[in-house]
Amino acid sequence: MTKHEFNPTILREYDIRGIIDETLFEADAEAIGRSFGTLLKQGGFQNVAVGYDGRTTSPKLKAALIKGLTSTGIDVFDIGMGPTPMLYYATYALKAGGGIMITGSHNPPSHNGFKMMLDSKSFFGAQIQELGRLSATGPFETGTGRVIDHPIMEDYVARLLQDFVPGRNLSVVWDCGNGVTGEALRRIVAKLPGTHLLLFDEIDGSFPNHHPDPTVAKNLEDLIRTVKGVNADLGIAFDGDGDRIGVVDGQGRILWGDQLLAILSREILANSPGAPIIADVKASQILFDAVRDLGGEPIMWRTGHSLIKSKMQEVNAPLAGEMSGHIFYNDHYYGYDDAPYVALRLLNIVGASESSLDQMRDELPEMINTPELRFPCPDEEKFDAVTRIQDALAAAGADYADIDGVRVNTEDGWWLLRASNTQAVLVARCEAKDEAGLTRLKSQLQQALLNANVEAPTF
C-alpha cells in the first residue's frame, strides 16, 4: 500500500495540525487513517470512533480518513458532527479501540487537524512521531472495514445532564463563538431551569463574529457586554471544538483558568478531603495555596492537555486544569476536558450557593500578573535555551521548579519560562503581590533571557 510522508510541521506534541492545502492535505488524512488503523489492529482492536467539527474542510478530511481506516480492516463508528469531548465520550460509550476527532480547535478557518485517542488514553508525543514513521515506511494492515453510522449527540447531551443538580434559578449567557458546540448547547439549555441566552450558536467555520478562543479577552467582549446588558449571573464561552471554557461573572469580569479551578476545587475537596488537584505550571500560586488551605494536595504539572490527562490517571486526581481553559473532571466523569460538562458543574456550585459567582471571585486573593508572554525562538534552539537558564539558576542556588521549563520563586512572587511544545517560541509569565515586585520579576526574567543569549524584548 502507498507509503506517505507528512510535512513535519504538522506532527505536533498533542495532535496533528496544519493549514489546508499548504501543509495539510486530504492525502495526509488518508495516510493517518491507514497508519492509525494499522496501530489499532496491531494492538488487538477492531474499531474506532470518528467525529468532526464545523469547519468547511472537515467533511472531506473525514471521508479521506475513513478511507484509510477501513483499508486496514478497521470498522468505523461515524458519530457525526459535534464537540471534541463528544468524540471522547463516544470512545467510552461505544467501547471503541480508539477515537479520531477532525478539528482545527481554536485556530483560524484555514487550519484543521486531528486529535486522537488509543485504548481510552491520549495519543500524543512519541506516539504521533511513530505514526509519522509508520506512514513513511509501512507495512500496513489490510482488510475491508465497515462504516457504521452512529449519531451520538443525543446520548452525549443526556450524559452531560446526568450530573446536573438543579439549584436556584440562574440567568446565564452562553457564547458558542460559531464553533461546533452550538447544537449541543441548544439541547442542553432546553433542559435547564432559569434563563438562558445563546450567542453565535449557528455553526459556521468562517467564525464571522469573533475568533473562538476564550483565553483571549478581546474574544469575550460580546459575552461581557451581553452579561451586563441583561444583568445575568454569569457568562460562559467555548473554543471552536468545545474542550476549553471561558467564564465571566455577573460584573463581566473574566475568571481565568486558575481562578475557575480554585472555585471548582471547593466542591471536590468538600466531598473528597485530601484529594490531589492538578494544575499546570502557568497557574497562579493562589490556586495552589487555595487547594492546600482546603485540605487538598496541590500538584503542579507540565502544560499540555494530553500530559495533564496522563498525570490524572497516574495519581487518580478527581480534578485538574490549565490556564488555557482545559478543565478535566475525573469525579463522576471520565477524566477528559469537556467544557460543556465543566459549565454544568459550575452551575451546580453557583446554584447551590447563597453566594454569587461575583462573591466567590472576590474571596480569592488578588495578585498582579502578566499575561502569557511569548518570545520567538527557533525550534532547534528553544529547549537548549531553557536548559542554559536552568543550569545558571542551579549554579546560583535559586529556588526553582523544573517540572516544565523553570518556575523561579522569589520574595516578590514567581516567574516562569518554558519552551512551547507547539510553536517556535519561549513562553513566560510573572506574578507578584504588587507592581514594584512585578517590575523586579520582569527584570530578572529579562536578564535570564539575555544571559542565555536569547533576544529579550522589553515588556
Image: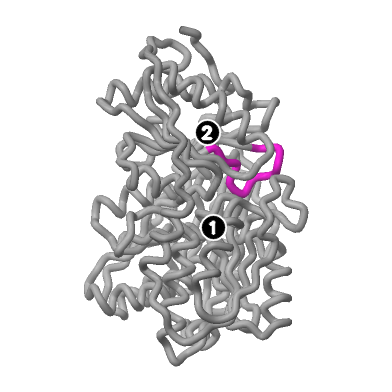
Q: Residue at x 50, y 54 (%)?
A: 243
The kind of residue tagged 2 is Ile
* Residue 440 coordinates in the image, percent (x, y): 57, 69
- The front one of 375 and 287 is 287
Secondary structure that dominates the magenta span? loop
Q: Which mark is residue 63?
A: none
* Residue 171 coordinates in the image, percent (x, y): 58, 81
Secondary structure state at the residue bearing disc 1: helix
In the image, is residue 108 part of the stretch drawn in magenta? yes
Q: Is residue 394 visible?
A: no
Q: Left of 155 or right of it: where is 439? A: right
Span colored in magenta: 102-111
How many residues crowd around disc 1 within 10 Å: few (fewer than 14), some, or many (20 or more)? many
Secondary structure state at the residue bearing disc 2: strand
- The front one of 125 and 392 is 125
User: Which comes sooner in the sequence, label 1 or label 2?
Assistant: 2
Rendered position, 427 above or below 113: below
Q: Residue at x 28, y 79 (%)?
A: 270
How many residues crowd around disc 2 within 10 Å: few (fewer than 14), some, or many (20 or more)? many
Q: Residue at x 67, y 78 (%)?
A: 227
| Residue matched to label 2 | 16
Q: Left of 301 or right of it: where is 202? A: right
In the image, is residue 202 part of the stretch drawn in magenta? no
* Residue 132 coordinates in the image, percent (x, y): 46, 22
Q: Left of 193 or right of it: where is 202? A: right
Q: Quadrant of the C terminus?
A: bottom right
* Residue 274 coordinates in the image, percent (x, y): 22, 72
| Residue matched to label 1 | 184
Q: Left of 395 or right of it: where is 53? A: right
Instruction: Give the label, 1 or 2, closer to the camera.
Output: 1
